[in-house]
Amino acid sequence: MDTGAARNCINSTFARRLQTAINPDSPNAQLTLNAADGKALSVVGTAEIEFSIAAYMCEAEFVVVDNLAHNVIIGLEALNDLNAVVDLSTSTLSIANNLVTVPLIQRFPSQNILRTVSAVTIDPMHELRET
């Protein structure tokens, strides 16, 4: 899920592995898409894909993209259709008017996150040693 993605996207290799029918002539196949770093993405076509979120079946159009960094990106297009609510305070995603609520994936457990407690500026050609 990517709230910064305007479209739903699927990696072309992943789509072919799933034996998904790809429509190269769809109007959305002519889209010009850019990655987060601004580089152009190579659009192959579109595909109607059925997927589930916690056993809730969904269907959406996905833009098929060569060399997409992730297998699937569920973007604002599907999130709007699903009436999705992303609740960061509880780290949950609710869809279908709160019919289904699932936890968001947390990349790192809190005990593995390192935070600074103070800042120290060390001048060039100097060294800092704590005893």
Image (cartoon, rainbow, N blue to C red):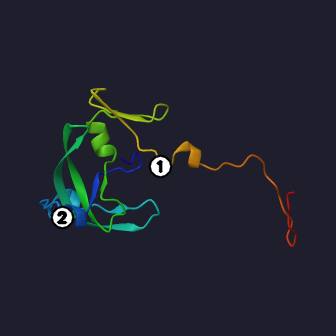
Residue 17 marker? 2
Q: For the residue carrying disc 1, how many other residues have a C-alpha within 10 Å: few (<14), some (14-19), or many (20+)?
A: few
Q: Is residue 17 left or right of residue 102?
A: left
Q: Residue at x 27, y 36 (%)?
A: 82
Give me the C-alpha separation between circle 2 and circle 1.
26 Å
SS at circle 2? helix
Q: Amino acid at mark 1?
A: Arg
Callouts 2 and 1 close, C-beta under 8 Å: no
Q: Residue at x 59, y 48 (%)?
A: 113
Give the answer, above or below, for where 1 lies relative to 70. Answer: above
- Of the two numbered discs 2 and 1 on the same chain, state the one appearing first in sequence: 2
Q: Amino acid at mark 2?
A: Arg
Give the answer, above or below, for where 18 lies relative to 100. Answer: below
Q: Nearer the viewer, residue 16 or 38?
A: 16
In the rendered image, residue 46, in percent from the top left (x then y), is placed at: 19, 58
SS at circle 1? loop
Q: Residue at x 34, y 44 (%)?
A: 76
- The quadrant holding residue 9 is bottom left
In the rendered image, residue 116, in percent from the top left (x then y), is placed at: 71, 49
Give the answer, above or below, for where 12 lies relative to 110. Answer: below
Which residue in the protein does label 1 denote? 107
Quadrant where the C terminus is found in the figure: bottom right
In the rendered image, residue 4, in percent from the top left (x then y), is placed at: 42, 49
Residue 9 marker? none
Q: For the residue carrying disc 2, how many other residues have a C-alpha within 10 Å: few (<14), some (14-19), or many (20+)?
A: few
Q: Nearer the viewer, residue 126 or 97?
A: 126
